[in-house]
Image (spheres, grey):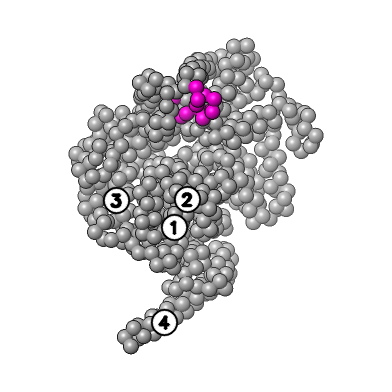
Amino acid sequence: MEDNRGVARRTTPFPNQLQGHGAVMNANLRKVLIMVYSLVGGAFHLYTGAFGAMAPPTQRGIHVFFLIPLCFLFVPSRVEYLRNNPRADNAFNIVLLALSFLCFGWYTLNWERLYANPSLTPLDLVAGIVSIVLVLESVRRTVGRFIAGLMIFFLVYAVIGPYIPHRFLAHQGYGVSSIVYLIFYGTEGIYGTPIAVCATFIVLIVMLGGFLNVTGGADFFMNISKSVAGTARGGPAKIAVFSSGLFGMISGSTVANVATTGSVTIPMMKRLGFSPIVAGAVESLASSGGQLMPPIMGAAAFIMVEYLMIPYIKLCLYALIPAVLYFFSVFMVVHFHSCRVGMAGIPRSECPRFFKELAHGGHMMIPIVILVILLSKWIGPMLAVFYAITSLWIVSSIRRHTRMTIRSFVEGVLQGMQAMAPLTAICAGAGIIIGVLSMTGLGMRMAFIIELLSHGHLLIALILTMVACIILGMGLPTVAAYVVLAVIVPPTLTNMGIGRIEAHMFIFYFAILSAITPPVATGAYTAAGIAQCDPMATGFCAMRLGLVAFLLPYAFVYRPGLLLHGIPWEIVRAVIFTSIGILAWAAATGKYLFREISFPVQIIMGLSGIMLIIPEYWTSIMGLGITLFIIIYHYLQHRRLSSLEAQKVVA
């Protein structure tokens, strides 16, 4: 279906993965099951959003009961034998659905008895073992074999602890019954904090994103971005920056961001002369920042709120300046690169008009504004998001092309629930890792390793933490990487004098950047698929262009004013010095400052950018002086050379 402006709008409520399911299950039966699970599960979450969550184990149990089976319904098994035997695959999926219904239902019905009496009956034990296997299978399907294998490794580690020769890694060991109770029936395993947040705040936020998408919110963000940045140098790349920031507010996922905005911006960049690798790198770099952008950040942000025990609106305020600086850094890198290679913008005739677009779809921003206002009034996040969804229904009726019908409402619920299914799987799987870290004491030992290797030096501890975030994030999505490290690292950093907000934001930030870090860079690989280029080369190009972004977490650790900590003057000074430092680093990375710059100048600009980030007053002043001198010198050189070139043309 198309709206009255020719913008394609998706109407099918079934995801693309379903198309590859082939004859795995009767198509009509599959659609009915997806419809039933999604709508009943969506209705449950909307109801609890309006009237309050149920008892935590019940809320989490029902959430998992509806979301994990969706992974088996619309994600192919990806097993070669089953792929070639549709009937066997069909039977396999039906068995998984039936087991999910029985085992996750068993937890929901029996948690009170098990909390009162932790001894497991044989039936409890079987249900727990099967449920853990089902979670592992859902993770394998949605995220990949490597992550499922990592979780199996942790489960094996919990069993073989006494037989490990290294004293530092050895532990007392646990039997199957103890592992099942702690991982499946306990409060720090599958049904721990990540699932708790998924079952309350995150699912409603994702459903809000689904409703915004089906009512044209994504189209509005893209058209606004085109109108603002389309005609500038390297216009499509700058559109990617703007649209990724805007769309990231409602998606909260790097891969979803790349898939949505990249399908438009990457072909535009290629058409105007960007190489496929650079186009994919720019899109993946820009899309990674969507999870930082308030007011609707990535799923890990909601989990961070639980760990920090602060209102969500406060976290949005803390994240605002780092998010703006991130996109500023990407924008400037794109600008300097575009100037150096001589990229033009999109012809003005092909760009929408800003005020026309604002009049056409600006009312779709009202629900987001309402959400921010309600959160700032200390209303609970669940109720605030429910009111935002209600307001979206009302506001969308203002214009015919955005009006939410019963069909589009159903589609929005289906999109939201199906987007939640992989996230629920990985959060449940992350609970397995957290449970093992907790019961074996491995988490505390890993924190001790960081403290031991750093010898008490904060910078070394931060570098080690960055490496751990990136390595772990190569295999895990942002939310899982953050959750695992949030259990281990913050106590070590806070012991060195860092605030809890800074420690958690540092981890969150690098867990996000792991999406563009090879050898496993999900954001870059998704962009490479759209750009039809080498995924590994795209990841390394994104890292090179994003070197500035890798400095930002150090900036807000050493300059807490960037997180709105301190007096107003300290905050303003931190923003000014860091912004100029970003400019210097972007020029060094893009090899351009009015004209292409030499390698020695790149080095000097890079060093001055670091000096501007360091909080010592005189170091920052020296960095500022060096940066301003180079900028003024190159500007005068540019004017002189331009004048000489103009005289030659006249002659």
What residue lies at 67% left-to-right and 20% top-to-bottom? Answer: 176
Give the quarter of the figure containing the N terminus. Answer: top left
Label drawn at residue 275: 1
The one of 410 and 149 positioned closer to us in this rendering: 149
Viewer-side label of 3, 1: 1
Q: Position of residue 211 (x, y in %)?
A: 32, 36
Query: How crowded is the residue under tag 2: few (<14 C-alpha within 10 Å), some, or many (20+)?
Result: some
Pick whichever of labels 1 and 2 is earlier in the sequence.
Answer: 1
- Measured Cα–Cα span from mark 4 to mark 2: 38 Å
- Measured Cα–Cα span from mark 1 to mark 2: 9 Å
- Measured Cα–Cα span from mark 3 to mark 1: 23 Å
Q: Which residue position holds label 3?
A: 223
Q: Are marks 1 and 2 in contact (CB under 8 Å)?
A: yes
Q: Position of residue 183 (x, y in %)?
A: 61, 25
> Which element is circle 3 on?
helix
Query: How crowded is the residue under tag 1: few (<14 C-alpha within 10 Å), some, or many (20+)?
Result: some
Magenta stretch: includes residue 75: yes
Pick whichever of labels 3 and 4 is earlier in the sequence.
Answer: 3
Image height of 352 relative to 427, above or below: below
Viewer-side label of 4, 1: 1
Query: How crowded is the residue under tag 3: few (<14 C-alpha within 10 Å), some, or many (20+)?
Result: many
- Measured Cα–Cα span from mark 4 to mark 1: 29 Å
Label 3 is placed on what type of residue?
Asn
Query: How crowded is the residue under tag 4: few (<14 C-alpha within 10 Å), some, or many (20+)?
Result: few
Q: Which residue position holds label 4?
A: 641
Q: Are marks 3 and 1 in contact (CB under 8 Å)?
A: no
Q: Position of residue 42 (x, y in %)?
A: 37, 26
Label 1 is placed on what type of residue?
Ser
Label 4 is placed on what type of residue?
Leu
